[in-house]
Amino acid sequence: MVAAALIQGLPLIVEALGGALGRINNPIAQAASKALSETSAALITGAITPEAQAEANRHLEKMTELAQKEQSETLTQVNESLRAEVASTDPYVRRMRPTFGYLVALTWSAQMLAVAYIITFKTEDASVVVDAIESLSTIWSVALSVLGLYVYKRSDEKKRSFPTKQASASTVLAPARKPRSFND
């Protein structure tokens, strides 16, 4: 979508954004949609010169390039941090991910149990609690995103550290052991 928008440039973006805003039942969105429709008409009729459109397209390309560069730098920094954590000889640094995961799981569970209790047994207070939980959505989205990244990266590390499922010809399998009984 972004690549197609960059190729087609400003007219496509103005038309798409105007159409999307026109479907929102809000006076501000409707006004923006109307302004974008007028801009689209000016682009089509030539009231906005091709040179001005080309300059807007160059600006759009540069802004997209800067946003992609920023995202790439952020991911590079996160990856460097994870690599430093894995390579660390400090036991706590190596255990930080599981510790964080267990703490997030514990606090999430406690919060959800508390919410379930309030909704089930104190229904008159449920709306206040649900509003309070909604206020915590940003902090939970950050914590769960970090946890998700940790889990994803750890899964990737595990995949790289174990050999593939295909056994080589030189692999020797150990004979199966007979289960031991209490009498042995």
Image: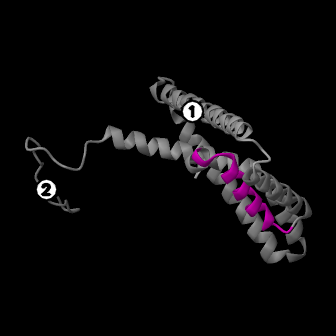
Question: Which residue is painted at 85% across and 69% down in the image?
Answer: 25
Magenta span includes 175:
no
The C terminus - image quarter: bottom left
Image coords of residue 29 (percent x, y): 85, 60
Image coords of residue 137 (percent x, y): 76, 54
Q: Is residue 90 left or right of residue 111?
A: left
Taking depth in this image into account, of 75 and 101 the one nearest to the observer is: 75
Question: Which residue is painted at 25% across and 45% down in the image?
Answer: 164
Image coords of residue 42 (percent x, y): 79, 52
Query: Dot 2, crowdedness within 10 Å: few (<14), some or many (≥20)?
Result: few
Image coords of residue 12 (percent x, y): 66, 53
Single out the mark in the foreground, 2 or 1: 1
**Residue type highlighted by circle 1:** Ser
Q: Is residue 52 left or right of residue 100?
A: right
Q: Residue furthest front?
A: 46
> Residue 72: which disc?
1
Taking depth in this image into account, of 125 and 165 the one nearest to the observer is: 165
**Residue type highlighted by circle 2:** Ala
